[in-house]
Amino acid sequence: MKQKTYLNVITIILLLYILINVSPLFLILINSFKPVREITTNPYGLPLNPTLFNYDLLLGWSYKTVGISFDAPPLLPSLLITIKVSSLCVVLSLILGLMAAYGLSRYRIGGNFLPFWFLSLLFAPPIVFAFPLYLMYRKLGLLDSTIGLVGANLTFNLPFAIWIFYSYLSGTSEEIEEAALIDGANSWIIFWKIITPIMRPIVIAVGALTFIFVWNEYLFSTILMNLSKTLTIALGGYNTGQLILYTSIAAGIIIDIIPPILILIFFEKYLVTGLSFGAVKG
Amino acid sequence: MPYKRRKREGVIYVAPAVVVLFFLTIYPIIYFIYLSFFEIKGWDLSKASFTGLTNYIKVLTDPLFLKSLQFTSLYTCLALLIELPVGLLLAFFLNELVESKRKTVKPFTILILLPILLPGVATAMMFSLMLNDLIGIIPHLIELIFKVKISLLSEAVTATLVLIVVDAWQWAPFFFLLIYAGFRMVPRDIIDAACIDGAGRWQILAYISLPMVKYMITVALVLRGIWLFRSFDVPKLLTGGGPGISTRTVSLQIYEYSFKEGLIGIAAAATFVVFILVNIVVLIYYKYIMTHREEVL
């Protein structure tokens, strides 16, 4: 095959793949702008009477009725809880993770054992922690609390942050820091003035990924949050079998995927390094 | 080595994370292992009675649990079998385009990676809408092409296939991501030298690029394997483990034990079995990356 035809063929194959990737999202997007009843007459085409009704329905504060007996629970309270939990989790994972990675890689605290422990936490199925945490939270009154859910999410996200920061730091030179130490600088100053700045790109990557991981989390929220539902729980609670809810569910899906997509677009470079670095190094 | 002489100072940095993770993981797990030796009815822990290893024997002989282990393993293997070649081809093709200096490839990466970052719940709900028997587009397309009307989620075989395809749709790009990163690291002059010696592009792929991304492929397989093994959200929302129990994963089975049936002791024993299984894999994997990662990076 000639070089030019060859390149054209693979470009077409890649474009076809991208079409498969994007078309389900496109279908859901156009359906989210249809009036409730249009879905049965026009399930695949562009909306004939575009409307924002579905978004209004979901983002209002109170229950609204779609049809005679079908209710769509509002998503706004869930949206706020999810933003709160995700942001708190990002802040805690970054601070605790950076500190721990610094201690592990520079002071060699815990030798080989601690890094292995963090790696094994990273791989443990969340179901392993979910019920033990449920029992513990029930005793402590932490069920349905933001802080409880943040804690549960830390069981994965904190080891993730530590592991990536640790691998990254282990590959950097200690010379500047040692010189500073000998000159009498205090390690806290070194941590903030030398370590944190060189880690900036990887910190952004881990922060963005942690936000997405917590945003997407489902298992812990199902088990630990009964009354205050996160976005994924609220969305997962809709019955997809009811045609009358079809367009509202479509709008819910779009609301749920906007933040991850925005993060992908704005932080693409960081995410790609973060994901591949994290995986390859650990 | 000034750092080594000040070990006590280093403990301050590691301590907060270790304390937090101790209370969130070690303590609850030990408590749960303790519970696995008791018979507990409902959620009332005060009525627990010691039963020794009975819960473990019950779990390991429970056909439901064994069936869920079997299904999860099958699902994991089949999904990896699709995701690896798809990801590999995507990575190879995009790498060829980049090497040929075409300018239009930049948005390709984002568009290929898109599904990875979507919430599993959103993916499950999306496919659930598209599989709707009355107006879903997938049954509609199948009817157009094959002239048959089928309800994909009501047969064990097709429901399993749906789960595998949905997982491949979302996660094949992960293989692409790692393998592509690996391809980009293959030194240009080695490939140029092979070209001068008359090697074709498939020979270069088979004898130079593939061996160099072997590490990436292993890493991707292990990570995805472990993630697939814990699948919960997509199977729960898309098939609910059904029809019957045909697509019930291990995580769903443990969820059934505890929340649906209130068998806490049994759930604890099952959890511990899974925990051990995963940790054996992690231990082997840890040894592998520790010995291999230096030679690649």
Image: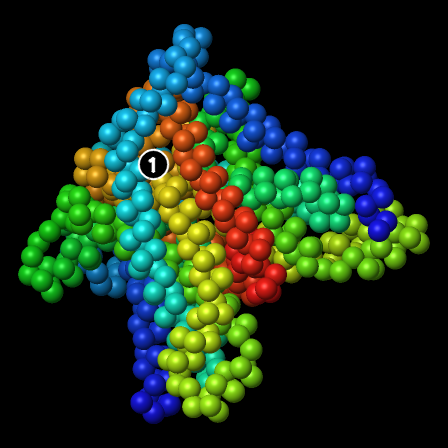
Relative to A8, residue B296 above or below: above
Tell me if I can see residue B159 in this picture. Answer: yes
Q: Chain of mark 1?
A: B
Residue visible at 56% across and 34% down in the picture:
A151
**Which residue shows up at 39% across the image and 80% down it?**
B203
Residue designated by label 1: B250
Which of the two residues, B101 or B276, is positioned nearer the viewer here?
Answer: B276
Q: Position of residue A16 (x, y in %)?
A: 30, 72
User: What residue occupies the far right of the structure in this picture?
Assistant: A183
Quarter of the image for residue B44 reads top left
Left or right, A164 with respect to B221, comes to right
Task: Give the left or right position of residue A115, taking residue A217 as reference.
Answer: right
Residue B39's x, y, as percent? Answer: 38, 13
* Amino acid type of the residue that numbered disc 1 sits on in the rendered structure: Val
Which residue is found at the position 22% from the left and 52% from the top? B161
Left or right: residue A87 versus residue B159 is: right
* B194, above or below B63, in the image: below
Q: What is the tally of numbered marks visible in this picture?
A: 1
User: Looking at the picture, how far across and down is residue A89, in whole percent?
Assistant: 58, 41
Above or below for A40 versus B17: below
Which structural element holds mark 1? helix
* Residue B270 occupies quadrant: top left
How packed mark 1 is, by other alpha carbons closer than 10 Å (few <14, some 14-19, many 20 or more), is many
